[in-house]
Amino acid sequence: MDDTTLIDKARRLVANASRISAFTGAGISVDSGIPDFRSEGGLWERYDPHEFATYDSFLADPSKFWTMGQELAEVILKAEPNDAHLSLSRLEKAGKLVGIITQNIDNLHQTAGNTNVTEIHGNYLRAYCLDCREEYVGDAIHRRVVEGEIPPHCDKCGGILKSEAILFNEPLPQDAMEKAISLCKNTDLMLVIGTSLSVYPAAFLPQLAKNSGAKIILINLEGTNRDDVADIVLRGSASDLVPKIADF
Ligand code: NAD
Ligand code: ZN
């Protein structure tokens, strides 16, 4: 099937569905200027996430994580939602999109206007103190990090702060996973966008939606580990393809 036929087919699935969900990964935010783990010449070539962003390495040396966090904060703080995020927001306003499950920590779905966003890997805009558990919400901590406070310390007790973004080897937030699973069981069409589907258990969620009866449209720049789960695979950039299938 050529690309136009596939896009038409995907548009028809979107038009006929009434409980659409989206499952998104780093690829949806690449056109907003936030690199994914695979982009060449990007942040992650200098900071191997498996070295700089594991839970164990954070506990052993928080400065190492926050040195990477300083560059990441600079990138994330200036990022704006792109046409893919905005299209998903319009789909919610049209009453068709019931929720988004995201692996991203960048808050761009919320900035775009989506209201039901389940973050299974946390959010960089929240941090907490390892000692007294005081919570910090918003970008103030990251602005302090950008200005050189590495690692950032708690205003109350001086303890070290941890971002609420989930690190490798860190347990996933149980409440978010339960919400994600429930959405997968209650959707008739899932748009899987910008994820290599290589991180488990997140990569299992589209399969769960399919097993529960949903159609799956997969949009990604390149082949993923689980293209087989999709009814339609669209190859290309999210900011180009999502509006083509979801805007009416
Ligand atoms: P990934 O890096 O494993 O995969 C991203 C996929 O997106 C790749 O297959 C790539 O081909 C595709 N892609 C790149 N640009 C695209 C575009 N413009 N349009 C469509 N697809 C595009 O990312 P992942 O599967 O999401 O998982 C990696 C982990 O890293 C996740 O836990 C995620 O939380 C984290 N992460 C988050 C951000 C963010 O918050 N923006 C950025 C980097 C990594
Ligand atoms: Zn504290």
Image (spheres, helix red, strand yellow):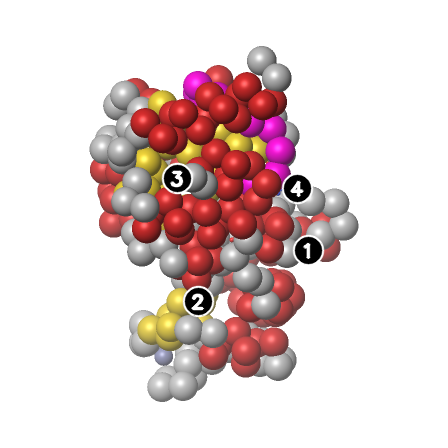
Q: CA distance from mark 4 to mark 1?
A: 10 Å
Q: Is residue 235 within the magenta segment?
A: yes
**Badge 2 residue CB within 8 Å of ligand 1:** no
Q: Which quadrant would the N terminus be assigned to in this image?
A: top right
Tag shown at residue 198: none
**Is 105 above or below relative to 132?**
above
Task: First in sequence, mark 1 or 3: give its number.
Answer: 3
The magenta stretch spans which residues? 229-238
**Secondary structure state at the residue bearing disc 2:** loop
Which residue does the numbered mark 2 point to in the structure image? 125
Q: CA distance from mark 1 to mark 2?
A: 19 Å
Which residue does the numbered mark 1 point to in the structure image? 43
> Residue 148 versus residue 58: which sits nearer the camera?
148
**Secondary structure state at the residue bearing disc 4:** loop
* Type of the residue with mark 1: Leu
Residue 65 shows up from this direction: no
**Secondary structure state at the residue bearing disc 1:** helix
Whether the residues at callouts 3 and 4 have beta carbons within 8 Å, the answer is: no
Tag shown at residue 22: 3
Looking at this view, name the residue that lies furthest to the front.
248
Q: CA distance from mark 3 to mark 2?
A: 21 Å
Looking at this view, name the residue that lies furthest to the bottom.
156
Residue 72 drawn at (x, y percent)? 60, 63
Residue 22 drawn at (x, y percent)? 39, 39
Task: First in sequence, mark 4 or 2: give its number.
Answer: 4
